[in-house]
Image: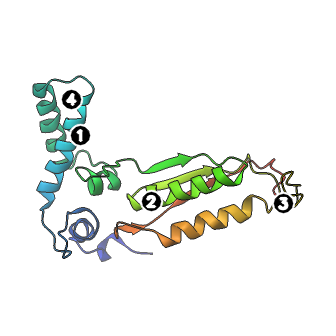
Amino acid sequence: MISSNSIPPDISQEVLKKRCLLKNSQGEIIETPNQMYLRVADNIAKTETQYGATNQEASSVQGVFYKLTLDGKFLPNSPTLMNAGKPEGLLSACFVLPVEDNIPDIFEAVKNTALVQKAGDGTGFTFDKLRPTGNMVSSSGGETSGPISFWKVISETTNAIQQGAHRRGANMGMMSVEHPYS
């Protein structure tokens, strides 16, 4: 167990440098923590105008958001700190992707997993719609491999994607305890 006395006092700065602050193409940090907070606040305020806020209202949102983060009273999730103002601009920590019981839809979920995680976000799935291992496949006369085999495909997809070199991907898989998976 790590005691609070053993954590370096500047660990938050090291995390910001490693994961959140913008870097140039040579990997050199090109913004300060204050600039990061301003980048995030600008991005949030810009979004407000897309939902009817005036420029003056958006400017007010930007100022309030910036001050809250600067004062340590509010801190958004890490994808927001990493991605606000970037071309992908995904600010959510997790996307729940559908997994239907057919090969095209399953591999559409695999493709979307890679794209979402490449942008720095996590993915969640429910595997309840997949048939259990050994059920008949009407189109081929073969048997289904079951949901666990597709968990492994998604897991390997996640292993292959480094989220913009910020962190490893994360998945959440769900299946009802009543599913006859095996």
Question: Do the residues bearing badges 4 and 3 touch, measured as CB atoms within 8 Å?
Answer: no
Residue 68 seen by the camera: no
Question: Do the residues bearing badges 1 and 3 touch, measured as CB atoms within 8 Å?
Answer: no
Determine whether 115 is above or below 157 in the image. Answer: above
Using the image, tell me which numbered label, if any, was put on residue 117: 2
Q: SS of the residue at dot 1?
A: helix
Ranked by sequence position, the earlier of labels 4 and 3 is 4
Residue 142 at x, y percent in the picture: 87, 61
Callout 2 amino acid: Gln
**Callout 1 crowding tier (Cα within 10 Å): few <14, some 14–19, many ≥20:** many
Q: Quadrant of the C terminus?
A: bottom right
Q: What residue is at 66 percent from the left and 67 percent from the top?
A: 152
Which-is-in-front pick, marks 2 and 1?
A: 2
Q: SS of the residue at dot 2?
A: helix
Residue 42 at x, y percent in the picture: 16, 43
Using the image, tell me which numbered label, if any, was put on residue 49: 4
Residue topped by disc 1: 44
Ranked by sequence position, the earlier of labels 2 and 1 is 1
Tell which of 40 and 67 is nearer to you: 40
Residue topped by disc 3: 133
Callout 4 amino acid: Thr
Question: Do the residues bearing badges 1 and 4 touch, measured as CB atoms within 8 Å?
Answer: no
Tell which of 171 and 157 is nearer to you: 157
Query: Residues under labels 1 and 4: Cα distance?
Result: 9 Å
Callout 1 amino acid: Ile
**Callout 4 crowding tier (Cα within 10 Å): few <14, some 14–19, many ≥20:** some
